[in-house]
Image (cartoon, rainbow, N blue to C red):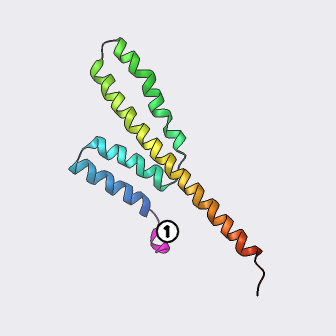
Amino acid sequence: MKKILNLPYLKEGFVVAVAILLAVFVSFTAAFFWSVFLAWLIWRLDSRVIAVIPLGFFVIIPLLLATGFEAPAEQLAVYAYFFLVIVVTLQIVELWRYEQRKKRRASQKNTKKTPNA
């Protein structure tokens, strides 16, 4: 199974296939957000990088509202919410992976300390 998962471009192909299917059958917006989420999840990128995007949106939204562009401001607020959900979910996954890695290292240390019988 690990050999299959290590095939070149398998992860990229999966993300692209999901994006195309969602773009065709659901919407481009759904395809974009799911692709971003899957890319960050699969390649284990730091989720704090993507957290900058909604923060930028939160700076732009009041400016749009002050200038009378309410519809784009509302849409940007929805996108900011989507990005925040992605960031929180990725943070939870990162925390879970960190705990798993800690458990694995602790068990490896314990097996090395036990004397051979």
Residue at point 72%, 69% (across, down): 109
Looking at the image, residue 12 lies above or below residue 53: below
Going by the picture, which residue comes out furthest to the bottom?
Answer: 117
Q: Nearer the viewer, residue 88 or 33?
A: 88
Residue at point 49%, 39% (across, down): 50
x then y, percent, for residue 52: 50, 33
Q: Nearer the viewer, residue 22 or 58?
A: 58
Residue at point 54%, 40% (across, down): 48
Looking at the image, residue 40 lies above or below residue 60: below
x then y, percent, for residue 93: 50, 52
x then y, percent, for residue 70: 29, 18
Going by the picture, which residue comes out furthest to the left?
Answer: 25
Q: Which quadrant of the structure image shows residue 101? A: bottom right
Horizontal side of residue 51 vs 102, given as left or right: left
Q: Amino acid at mark 1?
A: Asn
Dot 1 surroundings within 10 Å: few (below 14), some, or many (20 or more)?
few
Indicate whether residue 5 is drawn in magenta: yes
Q: Secondary structure at mark 1?
A: loop
Indicate whether residue 56 is drawn in magenta: no
Q: Which quadrant of the structure image shows residue 73? A: top left
Please give the residue where the numbered disc 1 appears in the rendered image.
Answer: 6
Quarter placement of the C terminus: bottom right
x then y, percent, for residue 75: 31, 28
Looking at the image, residue 89 lies above or below residue 76: below
Q: Which residues are magenta?
A: 1-8
Going by the picture, which residue comes out furthest to the top?
Answer: 67
